[in-house]
Image (cartoon, helix red, strand yellow):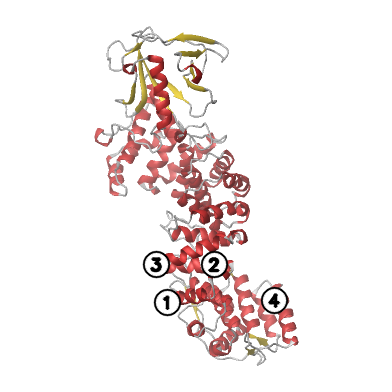
Amino acid sequence: MAAAVRPAPLPGHGRVPPGAEQRGPGPQQRQKKHVQLQMQPVSVNETVHLYGDTRNCTKSNKVWKDEQLFFKKLDNLCTSKEIFYFLSSLEVMSDTMASGALQRISEVEVDDNGLKNPGLLENDVFRALCFQLEFESSRLSNTGLLKALQALIKLRIDPQSTLMTSLLLESEERLGRGQLTAENLCALGESLLELESPNCATLEQIVSHMQERGIERWSPRGIVMVYKILQVTVREGKQWQNLLNRLNNVTLHTVSQLSPNFASVILNALVVLHQTRAVALVTALCKHSVKHVPYFTDHELVNVLEAFLYFGQKVQVFTEALERHVPGSIHTMHPQTVSKVMQYCCKMMILSKPIFDAVAERFISSADRLTTDQIAAYIIPFGTLNYLPPSASSLFRKLEAVLHTRLRHFQPHTLLNLLHSCVLIQRYPINFLPKIFSPYFLQKLQAQPPGLNRVVMSQLTQLFLTVTLECPFYEGPKLLSKYQVKAYPTPHSSPDVHLFKRVKTGLLYLLKKRIYFASEVSTPYFYVVDIEIKLDEEGFVLPAAQLEEVHRRIALCVDGQNRFCAHSHNLLGEEAIKQRHLQLLGYEVVQKVYKTPEKWQIIYTKKSFLVHMDSATDTGEYYWITGSPSALQSINVAGNDRYKRFPRDAGLEK
């Protein structure tokens, strides 16, 4: 059997082509390239012959022993050259042995980049096997047929070749005749799913045959295969929700048996199939994933993290597992996987110092090899969650160096998000702001989705306000007023309703009249103050509507849990910069902490604490803590005085 091999790589596989730097290779499966075979008969020592065996035939003990010895020997061979030499020494082999040999060849000669040695397809033994598989396909056992098909697909043999067409046609005919077992159906389904354009009708037929065998008796492998088939067929407009409901219920009882790969595949399928109502299954899979964190491949971990994000799962023990795994593995993890870990932390507002510190070190050592999207994914969470790692100086020096050399490669919105995140943590990109405020860059922002929407214009306004307040030495271009917004809309800025109500109730008890404080006050400086209290020169409270004689303004920030990182007292970056800017604008910022001892509500500034005891609500007694909780100065506000006095200095430094 002679064969002419003509490599036919498809676009998008192998090396990243010039200009594709933005996409970046990910841990996801790549598009495959195929090789084409022209089949011609040839004799290899005239000694290698296939004989089929069917499930209904009884093999002799000698054949069983021969196969056992064959596979034991085969598993110890590590190159195709060794395998071919071994095969050429045999006088006869079963089709199961032949297909097993092809599978072993695919295991040792195929990696993420494709076929390591295309020359192996010209080997006479390989071509002899392929020839006999093609022209004796009807005599092959189900196992031999389907294993050979799987191996040849993995070896990237062209699906349109006569060899592949023959094997696929024979498989579909046996499927139609109902000759395939549940295990055979799984093997065929997995093979078809590996093809770039599988026949959906055949996939649906496989699902129908699987259902006839009873969904409750499916193995984990069968469950996973059906989920993958449903992903493909749903894209074609097919609806399987009734089957999915049953499948989700059955899967719930097999979660504990799932391998890392199976758990990852099912979670990914639930995302693709939009199974938002399968709450119990999603929760069980997410908890089950915890023990598999050290064993997930990059691609599997990305699937799991995407599912956590899609379903809004925030499992503390999963985060702890990531904290144990990521720092030790980060230098071998794919950059796209690291990016997904940071995206998960950022979206879930999880400030994990072990992970962030490890990512900072990885960025310092490998930033030059990252795509621009990966650079942004590594850095933006530091600003969003308001955290500076121990290596902050080296981290931002490296970022600045990368920006100097690759600034023009960044997409406009990616660059804006990146620079905005830097100012949240007081890292000022002064050298790059002239570009951001230039009319040309603003036009590019407007031309690309999402355009100059309110969030984008808010970022621009906050950048401009930052350099105005914190970088007075900046002399570059200013942001034109038409690109500025009057108020800053932030997704986490709305005050906690219940906490806000308690604080206003406490202030009303303290000040006796509602006129002495205003809530949700819009300032001329872009920010909204939760509660504003005005004082005169001597420290007496003025009516909120009064404009004259205002000497001090107190901005009371009612910071609920939504303004902090999860399970933390660390303010989010957007709230930290707001409070910083309000102070620079002349406000005395007072913060109401959302978590306090049960009997106390604490409002504090950098110089004093105002403590309201729940038990004292009816007495009108409030206390300023001066220096320590034991030093209390009682202020009786039970009267109807026009002014309520706030002490100037309480002696407690920030």
Residue identifier under label 3: 239
**Category of crowding for the residue at label 2, using alpha-carbon neighbours closer than 10 angstroms: few (below 14), some (14–19), many (at least 20):** many
Task: Tell me how far mark 3 sits from mark 4, CA to CA.
Answer: 44 Å
Query: Which dot, 3 or 4, sits closer to the camera?
Result: 3
State left or right for residue 233 relative to residue 44: left
- Of the image marks 2 and 3, the number of the one nearer the N terminus: 2
Secondary element type, mark 1: helix
Q: Taking 55 as reference, is 618 above or below it?
A: above
Amino acid tagged 1: Ala
Amino acid tagged 4: Leu
Does the rendering let one see residue 119? no
Task: Tell me how far mark 2 sits from mark 3, CA to CA.
Answer: 18 Å
Return the x and y of residue 550 as percentages of the image width and height.
32, 12
Could you tell me if the residues under marks 3 and 1 are in contact, i.e. CB atoms within 8 Å?
Answer: no
Secondary element type, mark 4: helix
Residue identifier under label 2: 223
Query: Which dot, 1 or 4, sits closer to the camera?
Result: 1
Residue identifier under label 4: 74
Which quadrant is the N terminus positioned in? bottom right
State left or right for residue 144 relative to residue 543: right
Q: Taking 240 as reference, is 444 above or below it?
A: above
Residue identifier under label 1: 201
